[in-house]
Image (cartoon, rainbow, N blue to C red):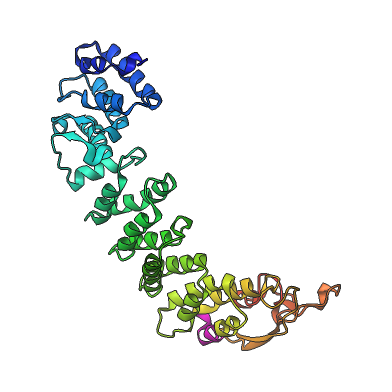
């Protein structure tokens, strides 16, 4: 038996009712729509929307737009006077129009970019019948704010299965070469997200090309985002290539060093230290962070049991002090902590300079 809320005549005569009664009826209809499993009834309701809404009380007009948005997958008939409404009501009906997409019936409405920005700002794309065309328009928009909205929508849309990982990648890749630094960096970060796993070989190659190009981006923020994305994907070779490349931007090499620490192999430490010795002021901090991640773990890269590393590293300090040799030999188990080697300044009772303290880990010998 059909519920009274789904009677088309109750929706067709909504404009003749007193505003409180009309609002109550529309609210009840909106709440009842998820329980209706008959597509024919929903399609009939979508076609029963009034052709013009400008003469309705604003509260009734707003409630009616919410019903239209709920009926977006069933091709609602949209009013022809949407652009004549007040800004708040116009935004609400334009959202219903975008939610319905190509399924909407009625007057064709052209939405320019300023209007589109007003509509999508603060709006969730949940419930949009076909979000991919709208995403494509946002990605191609000339206004950088619209392109940022597209990036913010991608993750929730993929999680809701509204778009696939392949579709999301097709939206992210153009933005990975965007002219705006913030858009470019955020797009690169998205390229390593878990919902982009399982790509086809061709899509994976396009993603690789975008990230490796970003690793050599002259903007430090983009290069740093690419280094983090590379680390999340576990691509050690891409980072090692940047560290070894003397022609790469210094900020990029430092970011690659820092990201390489968690993926390093035994031969990478020598490479990092060699680069760091060439310019300690520029690469010292990144070198120390990478070395600490590399050697501060349980040395599981070498064997299943932790072995002390007997490597000795000479670290040059800028300024009058020349250098000192820091033994990387860990004390034998059970030995006294007082036998550990320390920088000369520490033995003298003074705090060691920052460049010495961070050379082999925070607050202890390497």
Picture residue at 26% right of the left edge, 37% below the top: 100
Picture residue at 37% right of the left edge, 60% below the top: 187
The spot of residue 173 in percent (x, y) is 33, 62
Tell me if residue 176 comes above or below residue 71 in the rendering. Answer: below
Query: 47 left or right of 189?
Result: left
In the image, 106 versus 21, the foreground residue is 106
In the image, 143 versus 51, the foreground residue is 51
Which portion, as a residue range, is magenta?
Answer: 274-281
The spot of residue 119 in percent (x, y) is 26, 40
Q: Is residue 158 magenta?
A: no
Which quadrant does the N terminus fall into?
top left
Hey, which quadrant is residue 351 in on the image?
bottom right
In the image, 324 versus 182, the foreground residue is 182
Picture residue at 52% right of the left edge, 74% below the top: 236
Tell me if residue 268 comes above or below residue 183 in the rendering. Answer: below
The rendered magenta stretch, by its main secondary structure, is classed as helix
The spot of residue 124 in percent (x, y) is 36, 40
Tell me if residue 244 comes above or below residue 70 in the rendering. Answer: below
The spot of residue 80 in percent (x, y) is 13, 30
- Please indicate, yes or no, whether residue 260 appears anywhere in the rendered image: yes
């Amino acid at each position: 038996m059909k519920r009274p809320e789904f009677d088309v005549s109750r929706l067709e005569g909504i404009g003749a009712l007193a505003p409180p009664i009309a609002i109550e009826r529309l609210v009840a209809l909106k709440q009842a729509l998820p329980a209706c499993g008959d597509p024919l009834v929903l399609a009939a309701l979508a076609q029963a929307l009034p052709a013009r809404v400008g003469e309705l009380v604003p509260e009734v007009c707003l409630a009616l737009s919410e019903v239209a948005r709920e009926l977006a997958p069933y091709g609602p008939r949209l009013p022809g006077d949407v652009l004549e409404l007040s800004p708040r009501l116009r935004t609400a009906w334009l959202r219903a129009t975008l939610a319905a997409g190509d399924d909407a019936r009625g007057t064709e409405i052209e939405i320019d970019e300023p209007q589109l920005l007003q509509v999508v700002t603060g709006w969730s794309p949940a419930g949009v019948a076909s979000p991919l065309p709208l995403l494509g328009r946002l990605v191609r928009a000339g206004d950088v704010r619209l392109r940022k909205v597209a990036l913010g929508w991608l993750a929730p849309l993929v999680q809701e299965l509204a778009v696939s990982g392949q579709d999301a990648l097709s939206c992210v890749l153009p933005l990975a070469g965007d002219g705006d630094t913030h858009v470019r960096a955020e797009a690169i970060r998205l390229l390593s997200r878990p919902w982009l796993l399982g790509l086809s070989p061709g899509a994976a190659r396009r993603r690789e090309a975008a990230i490796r190009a970003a690793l050599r981006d002259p903007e430090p923020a983009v290069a740093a985002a690419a280094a983090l994305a590379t680390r999340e994907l576990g691509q050690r070779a891409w980072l090692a290539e940047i560290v070894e490349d003397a022609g790469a931007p210094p900020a990029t090499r430092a970011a690659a060093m820092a990201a390489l620490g968690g993926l390093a192999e035994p031969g990478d430490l020598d490479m990092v230290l060699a680069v760091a010795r060439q310019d300690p002021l520029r690469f010292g901090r990144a070198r120390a962070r990478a070395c600490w991640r590399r050697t501060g773990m349980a040395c599981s890269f070498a064997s299943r049991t932790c072995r002390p590393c007997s490597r000795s590293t000479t670290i040059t300090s800028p300024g009058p002090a020349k250098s000192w040799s820091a033994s990387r030999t860990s004390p034998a188990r059970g030995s006294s902590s007082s036998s550990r080697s320390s920088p000369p300044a520490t033995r003298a009772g003074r705090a060691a300079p920052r460049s010495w303290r961070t050379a082999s880990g925070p607050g202890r010998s390497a």
